[in-house]
Image: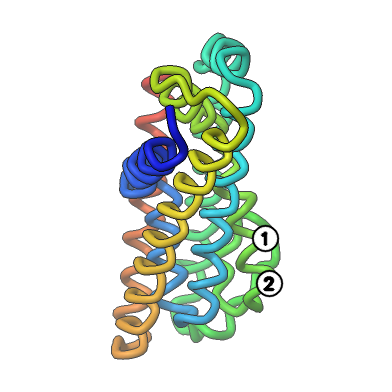
Amino acid sequence: MNVPAALVAGLLSGGAIATQFGAVSALLLETAVVAGPRRAAAAGLGVASVDFAYAALAVGAGAGARVVLASHEAELKVAAALALTFIAVRGLRSLIRDPARPLAATSEPTVGATGRSLPARDQYLRFVALTAINPLTIVYFASVATSVSLGGVPSRFAFVIGAGGASAVWHLSLSLAAGHAGRRLTPAIQRAISIVGRLVVLAIAVRLALAA
């Protein structure tokens, strides 16, 4: 496969996985609405960075990574479900336990935290960790890379750039749009969105566990 075709393949595969709504998307939207566009952009770049890294690992390791990870798919899904359940329950407890507390005052510096008042750098690292919970993304990228027969290093590099670029464009657009929209919402609506977001994450965790 030539370089332009590999770039297009990367863009399409990266866009396909980025636009799937999952737990990270729900948490990204929640963070964007209550933390603002600048921190949301950092969070979106954190998601895209992991997609870029997983695409690079998939292309580098090839079918080997796909076989190893696919053979442990059930265990990985259970681990991800447990992590997401912890994140959802902790966030819900924080939101429900003290409903009078302003959203901007909430500061929980761990991966399971709501992260509303975390600086942009910490938002980036937080979403790197959240996205890395699901290494099965490597299986997807490895399957695509194998099926299109990338060939030499330039084509492989173009595929990775395309996949990472598509993820970055989507997640930045999503987070910035939600971040600017969130500025027009009252704290009560922001809190309601946060609660709904955590319930969505919990539902996704249950679905993952049942699919394991």
> Which residue is at the front of the view, 158 or 37?
158
Do labels 2 and 1 touch, CB within 8 Å? Answer: yes
Q: Secondary structure at mark 1?
A: helix
Does 78 sit left or right of 176 as displayed? right
Does 140 sit left or right of 52 as displayed? left
User: Dividing the image into 4 quarters, which one contains the C terminus?
Assistant: top left
The vertical placement of 125 against 176, above or below, is above
Asked whether the viewer can see residue 107, the reply is: yes
The vertical placement of 165 against 80, above or below, is below
* Residue at horizontal 49 percent and vertical 79 percent from the top: 35
Residue 99 location (% of width, % of height):
44, 77
Q: Which residue is mark 1?
A: 125
Residue 78 location (% of width, % of height):
52, 25
CA separation in Å, label 2 and label 1: 6 Å
Answer with the quarter of the image where residue 12 lies. top left
Q: Which residue is mark 2?
A: 121
Disc assigned to residue 185:
none
Residue 195 location (% of width, % of height):
37, 63
Q: Secondary structure at mark 2?
A: helix
**Residue type for callout 2:** Arg
Q: Callout 2: 10 Å neighbours few (<14), some, many (20+)?
A: few
* Residue at horizontal 35 percent and vertical 47 percent from the top: 15
Residue 18 location (% of width, % of height):
38, 48
* Residue at horizontal 56 percent and vertical 70 percent from the top: 42
Answer with the quarter of the image where residue 147 lies. top left
**Residue type for callout 1:** Leu
The vertical placement of 128 against 183, above or below, is above
> Which residue is at the front of the view, 174 or 152?
152
User: Dividing the image into 4 quarters, which one contains the N terminus?
Assistant: top left
Q: How many marks?
A: 2
* Residue at horizontal 55 percent and vertical 33 percent from the top: 156
